[in-house]
């Protein structure tokens, strides 16, 4: 039951957000437990693994199975307080003996994808078990081999029930990772709300587009702007980057890994923040700043009533509607200012155009980047 607040309005500090484990960590724990059982030493429960940058993870086993010629273990992923689509998924590993001297071989089981396009850290045809988790699994299995005397000549098949269905809600199909999820993680730890997985997906999308030889990509803040840009430029899926709020992460990566032309598209509210110089467009992490917005409107020679409204408007939509009623092309000015900001971050090797859309997908501002 909720309690009535006391007269003392001093708020208590929020508890720290709980960290979690990556799919790579879970796959490593499952593979280590399965290999130990296959080597005759039983399933360790919980299983402890060493993390890449120090420290360890202790993980309880959800399921185990030992049969002739193979062993299976599974761990339920706990992503902590991060809104991770794979939180609660069962990550399993089946370990089976391989030919003497064959080393550790990785396979994609049900729910784990296969790479089909160049530009990713793994070549086409390989299971989507990234280099970081592969290194973690190798280290864990070599530890078991040293302790048991059993050579680490095995196949490791990683599986995630319902992984194919979950992958449909991720970038994997667009990146050419088909059939399921990717096994990810460079540190082994999920940092709540670090947004690293999203930025990682944007970077891999740029890598795939470059490897495919594309000279034009579009970074969009949401589905409405993406649909409008797709229609305007007839771009393929490979050219479309689900930028979301991460303008800075997108533009800085393109500066180091340029594509000749970038269309940056989004709604009026988010691109107004970019026009103000913000690189994170999230409303909670970077709310609209009334005074800064008023200053921006002054540089645009906006009508005085609109500048005054900037200090009191509840939403960017209210400001946009007021500008339209006054006949002032605010969205066009936002597009031009946002392009100036984005171009400075992306660098001269990338020509940037900016498109601003309203909530209905109507284009209300355009700052061209090329003729």
Image (tube, grey):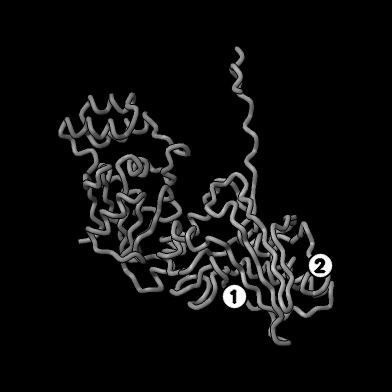
Horizontal and vertical percent position of residue 54: 73, 58
Q: Quadrant of residue 235?
A: bottom left
Q: Residue at x 39, y 34 (%)?
A: 288
Q: Is residue 202 visible?
A: no
Query: Element type at marker 2?
Result: loop
Query: Which image quadrant: the N terminus?
Result: top right
Give left or right: position of 211 versus 102: left
Horizontal and vertical percent position of residue 292: 37, 33
Lower position in the chain sequence, tag 1 or tag 2:
2
Query: Which image quadrant: the C terminus?
Result: bottom left
Give the total number of marks visible in the rendering: 2
| Residue placed most toward the observer, 21 or 196 | 21
Which residue position is annotated with label 1?
Answer: 107
Q: Quadrant of residue 233?
A: bottom left
Which residue position is annotated with label 2?
Answer: 42
3D distance between C-alphas at marks 1 and 2:
23 Å
Q: Residue at x 39, y 43 (%)?
A: 277
* Circle nearer the viewer, 1 or 2: 2
- Residues tagged 1 and 2 counted as in contact (Cβ below 8 A): no
Outermost residue to the bottom: 100
| Residue placed most toward the observer, 277 or 216 | 216
Query: Element type at marker 1?
Result: strand
**How many neighbours does mark 2 have within 10 angstroms: few (below 14), some (14-19), or many (20 or more)?**
few
Is 339 located above or below residue 322 in the figure? Answer: below
* Residue 367 tag number: none
Horizontal and vertical percent position of residue 344: 36, 53
| Residue placed most toward the observer, 197 or 258 | 197
Q: Is residue 311 visible?
A: yes
Outermost residue to the top: 7
Q: Residue at x 37, y 73 (%)?
A: 212
């Amino acid at each position: 039951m909720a309690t009535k607040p006391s007269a003392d309005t001093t708020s208590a500090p929020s508890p720290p957000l709980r960290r979690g484990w990556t799919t790579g960590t879970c796959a490593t724990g499952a593979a280590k437990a399965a290999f130990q059982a296959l080597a005759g030493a039983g399933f360790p429960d919980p299983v402890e693994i060493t993390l890449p940058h120090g420290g360890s993870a202790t993980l309880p086993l959800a399921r185990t199975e030992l049969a002739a010629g193979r062993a299976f273990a599974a761990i339920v992923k706990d992503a902590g307080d991060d809104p991770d689509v794979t939180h609660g998924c069962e990550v399993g590993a089946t370990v089976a003996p391989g030919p003497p001297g064959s080393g550790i071989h990785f396979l994609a089981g049900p729910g784990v994808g296969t790479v089909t396009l160049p530009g990713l850290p793994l070549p086409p045809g390989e299971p989507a078990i990234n280099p970081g988790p592969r290194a973690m699994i190798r280290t864990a299995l070599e530890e078991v081999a040293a302790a048991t005397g059993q050579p680490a000549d095995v196949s490791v098949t990683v599986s995630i029930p319902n992984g194919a269905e979950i992958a449909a809600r991720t970038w994997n199909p667009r990146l050419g990772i088909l059939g399921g999820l990717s096994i990810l993680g460079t540190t082994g730890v999920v940092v709540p709300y670090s947004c690293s997985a999203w930025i990682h997906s944007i970077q891999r999308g740029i890598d795939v587009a470059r490897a495919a030889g594309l000279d034009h990509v579009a970074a969009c803040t949401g589905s409405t702007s993406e649909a409008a840009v797709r229609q305007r430029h007839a771009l393929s899926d490979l050219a479309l980057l689900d930028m979301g709020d991460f303008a800075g992460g997108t533009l800085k990566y393109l500066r180091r890994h340029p594509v000749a032309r970038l269309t940056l598209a989004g709604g009026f509210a988010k691109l107004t923040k970019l026009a103000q110089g913000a690189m994170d467009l999230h409303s909670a992490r970077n709310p609209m700043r009334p005074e800064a917005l008023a200053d921006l409107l002054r540089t645009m020679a906006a009508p005085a009533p609109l500048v005054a409204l900037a200090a009191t408007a509840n939403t960017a939509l209210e400001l946009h509607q007021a500008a339209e009623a006054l006949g002032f092309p605010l969205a066009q000015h936002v597009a031009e200012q946002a392009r100036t900001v984005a171009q400075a971050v992306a660098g001269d090797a990338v020509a940037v155009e900016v498109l601003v859309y309203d909530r209905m997908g109507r284009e209300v501002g355009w700052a061209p980047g090329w003729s």
